[in-house]
Image (cartoon, coloured by chain):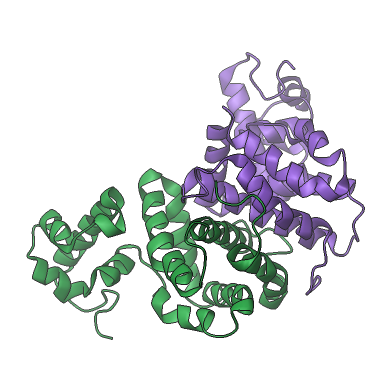
Chain colours: A purple, B green
Amino acid sequence: MAGRTGRRAGKPDTRESILAAARTVFAERGFDGASIRAIAAGAGVDPALVHHYFGTKDQLFLAAMNSPVDPRELLPQVLDGDPGEVGTRLVRTFLGIWDSPAGSAAVALLRSGLTNEWTARLLREFLTTQVIRRVLQHLDLDPVEAPLRGSLVASQMIGLAMMRYVIRLEPVASVPAETLVGTVGPTVQRYLTGDLPAGPA
Amino acid sequence: MAGRTGRRAGKPDTRESILAAARTVFAERGFDGASIRAIAAGAGVDPALVHHYFGTKDQLFLAAMNSPVDPRELLPQVLDGDPGEVGTRLVRTFLGIWDSPAGSAAVALLRSGLTNEWTARLLREFLTTQVIRRVLQHLDLDPVEAPLRGSLVASQMIGLAMMRYVIRLEPVASVPAETLVGTVGPTVQRYLTGDLPAGPA
């Protein structure tokens, strides 16, 4: 898709100004509170130009985050099928991204999220609005419990990525992905659909 | 204990040279391969001075890592008691560190471990030699499976710390610690002593 992640040719200064303004506005207001209008104002350009370069607000956000993938393209293969196997499919798809050529960009994204409060806020918005919200909407979960379930899943998945691809702790760093699908998949499944003893607070 | 984590007065330049040399040697050779002799040589001082300032190799390593705690002091409260509840105790003790005044130092340690390959290597050595190895030695685990179990536990615990204290993903960031003890404790318990379907690779 031309221009989806911002690879379309254009005046580099304008594109970079828009991306810089987008990072600021998304970090300050969150994804939901950010508007293309505010981002355009921050970059000193017309809102139509932002749409022209980057498409929708979702697409601009992914470009601003340097996201290696568009979660919307991958979630169907996780969410479609037996709901009792969604944990397994989520771990398999997730590791597939990191084991692909996109993996180095994913490591960079994770590292950047740890650098300071500001980048952490962007990574949090990314997880919440681009991934977790969509998974939870698809599953038929108690809306009171759903947010805790989603953030527990994120804690396990991001921790797994950190140990396998960043810290490179053995043997998690080098076992076949399917070993982790088999061992971590049930954890993710329990967080999504199992009993949570303490319940939400 | 005087001087345990390097807080004893001394010539600041000498102390810093030793700590810098220690970080280099621990990162290059790993904890087990590093020697006080090599660290002393790197700092251009006598090995006796390293012992004088920092004590044992373990103590020097904790000082070089700016570790907020000495895991050996905390592990007894995790490991003593019903082995079927070790997961619960591990999560409770772990969150207790992060929720204490030592928490900000723990965040700094985690962030530094993400900065580059070199600091990641130090964090990996810290997890492996100061925490995981000691937990596994205490539990009566199949030695073939034990390393995978230990690194799965690390993936969940570090991921939990990242979401709660660094990324601050809600609601994991603000639920009471006991909610996480109740939900994540069983995961850690399964990784340590439960069936691992895929087994080690």
Rendered residue at 50%/61% (across/down) = B146
Residue B137 showing in the rendered view: yes
Rendered residue at 52%/50% (across/down) = A163
Q: Where is residue B142 in the image (x, y as percent from the top left)?
A: 51, 63
Position of B70 with respect to A63 (left or right) is left
Position of A139 with respect to B74 (left or right) is right
- Observer-nearest of B72 and B169: B72
Rendered residue at 60%/59% (across/down) = B156
B105 versus B148 height, above or below = below
The quarter of the displayed image where residue A196 is located: bottom right
Q: Give the quarter of the figure containing the N terminus of chain B.
A: bottom left
The quarter of the displayed image where residue B66 is located: bottom left
Q: Position of residue A95 (x, y in %)?
A: 63, 39
In this rendering, the count of numbered labels is 0
B180 versus A181 height, above or below = below
A143 versus B48 height, above or below = above
Q: Where is residue A145 in the image (x, y as percent from the top left)?
A: 85, 64
